[in-house]
Image (cartoon, rainbow, N blue to C red):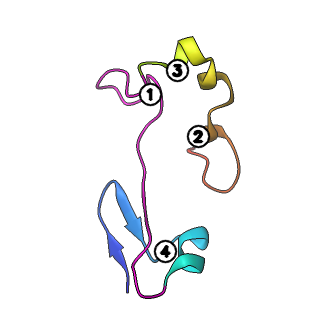
Amino acid sequence: MNFQSKTINAGGNAKTVKGDGEYLTAVMYLAPYKLSGEGNLCPMAELAACHKGCLNTAGRGKFD
């Protein structure tokens, strides 16, 4: 079963398909840190310094 919206994807992701079984596994894609254009979705990113190695620039799921 596939479910798709602008921010939620189920059934079409290589990692979530592996977890499908009795329950549908989904991923919610959000723009990290200050990239959304709507404000900062990760208010602790600078304090935690996690914005430097954010996964939006890594792997097959990177945002181009």
The answer for how far apart the CA atoms under marks 1 and 4 are is 24 Å
Q: Which residue is identified by label 1?
A: 35
CA–CA distance in space, label 1 to label 2: 10 Å
Q: Position of residue 11 (x, y in %)?
A: 45, 77
Where 15 falls versus 38 (above or below)? below
The residue depicted at 62 percent of the width and 25 percent of the height is 50
User: At label 4, which amino acid type do we have?
Assistant: Gly
Residue topped by disc 2: 56
User: Which callout, 1 or 2, points at the residue further toward the start of the chain?
Assistant: 1
Disc 3 target residue: 45
**Magenta residue check for 23:** yes
Q: In what element is the residue under mark 4?
A: loop
Label 1 with label 3: CB-CB less than 8 Å: no
Which type of secondary structure does the marked residue at label 1 adopt? loop
Task: List the single residue furthest toward the top.
Answer: 47
Residue 7 placement, left or right of 14: left
The label on residue 12 is: 4
> Cα distance, mark 2 to mark 3?
13 Å
Q: Which residues are magenta?
A: 21-42
> Is disc 1 in contact with disc 4, using a CB cutoff of under 8 Å?
no
Sequence order check: which comes first, mark 1 or mark 3?
Answer: 1
Quadrant position of the N terminus in the picture: bottom left
Query: Three-letter amino acid code at disc 2?
Result: Asn
Q: Earlier in the sequence, mark 1 or mark 4?
A: 4
